[in-house]
Amino acid sequence: MIAAMIIIICVGMAFIALLVYSRYQMSRIPGLSFREALEYTTNGNRDAVITVGIIKDGRASYTVYGENGRELPKEPHTYEIGSLTKTFTAAMVSKAAREGKIDINAAIDEYLPLPPGNSYPTVAELLTHTSGYKSHYIESPMVSNFFTGKNSFLGVTKAMVLEKAGELSVPNEDYPFSYSNFGYAVLGLILEEAYGDDYAALAGRFAKELNLSHTQLSAQDGDLGKYWDWNAGDAYLPAGGLTSNVEDMLAYAQLQIDGAGYFSDCHKELRKISAAPETYRAMGINMDAIGMAWIIDRENGVVWHNGGTGNYNSYLGFRGNAAVVVLSNLAPSCRIPATVLGVKLLDELE
């Protein structure tokens, strides 16, 4: 009995010590330089491969970092970009709006075969995460995915998402920003209806149109491994299914800086929000407004988005003629995420 008590006390003390140490480390992060933050994030991690790209004065370059921030050979590795996929989906919607195929102020039942009598959100509300929809709704594949450790959204079909959208009656009122992967799955269905084609085909043509030859819906065949499993036609692919490399993402960042055509529409403020969590605010990262997917940090003049999957996290932010891309094969919860690294570097480019 006494031995058990001693073990419990020791475990408790170790947990408290770890918590205190973690908080101390977190308190140091705002004062770290990009380089210091990078070295801390990759410290002792032999598997770390973080690619950092910058655009400054019209020139793009990138560096690949490994364990302890050591520079690795310059190679365009394939990363999951997670929710940065939403900016591609939003750009496709913006393009469709310019072509007269989608009215972003129309309710979604204008495009989808949903039951009459319900109140549905608008396309703009889906784009800005202000629809009243939750992040996701539990479907049977999600249960088995949880117990097998797979991608939560694997196997959730378009029919499931369409049926759920038809069950949800959302009163016509202003909803606060609430990040919704489900909303972007619905946007994928709307794009399919607008163009009469599968989202995968639409995304492939769109990437080709932008000359992004290494950006595609995940085939789980990249060089870094541990990619999420997806089925062809999964409903949540428009919310987070793309993979890419730094060369494509830097080209994509330049398209955002140039802001031509439908990209400029994506950056226009559609909704005011105040959604930055305390951890972001401590780093000087703000979420003051949102356009078509893109987050607007008014105070710092930055337009940005990030992404995260089980084993990857990413960031793209731009201000004026400068942009930063961070692609990491580490989980979002691994020490300092790509978002914080990217913001630090963008500030240092000034």
Image (cartoon, rainbow, N blue to C red):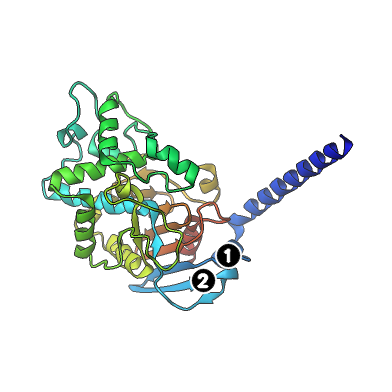
Residue at 81% x, 44% y is 10
Q: Position of residue 253 (x, y in %)?
A: 33, 63
> Above or below — where is 252 with respect to 241?
below
Q: Position of residue 116 (x, y in %)?
A: 17, 23
Q: Are dots 2 and 1 in contact, CB under 8 Å?
A: yes
Q: Is residue 22 left or right of residue 265?
A: right
Circle 2: residue type: Tyr
Query: In this rendering, does residue 135 appear at all?
Result: no
Disc 2 packing (10 Å; few <14; some 14–19; many ≥20): many
Q: Which mark is residue 309?
A: none
Looking at the rendering, in which quadrant would you find the N terminus? top right
Circle 1: residue type: Thr
Query: In this rendering, does residue 309 appear at all?
Result: yes
Q: Which residue is mark 2?
A: 65
Residue at 33% x, 35% y is 130
Spatial distance from mark 2 to mark 1, Cα to Cα? 8 Å
Disc 1 packing (10 Å; few <14; some 14–19; many ≥20): many
> Residue reaching furthest bottom?
73
Residue at 75% x, 47% y is 17
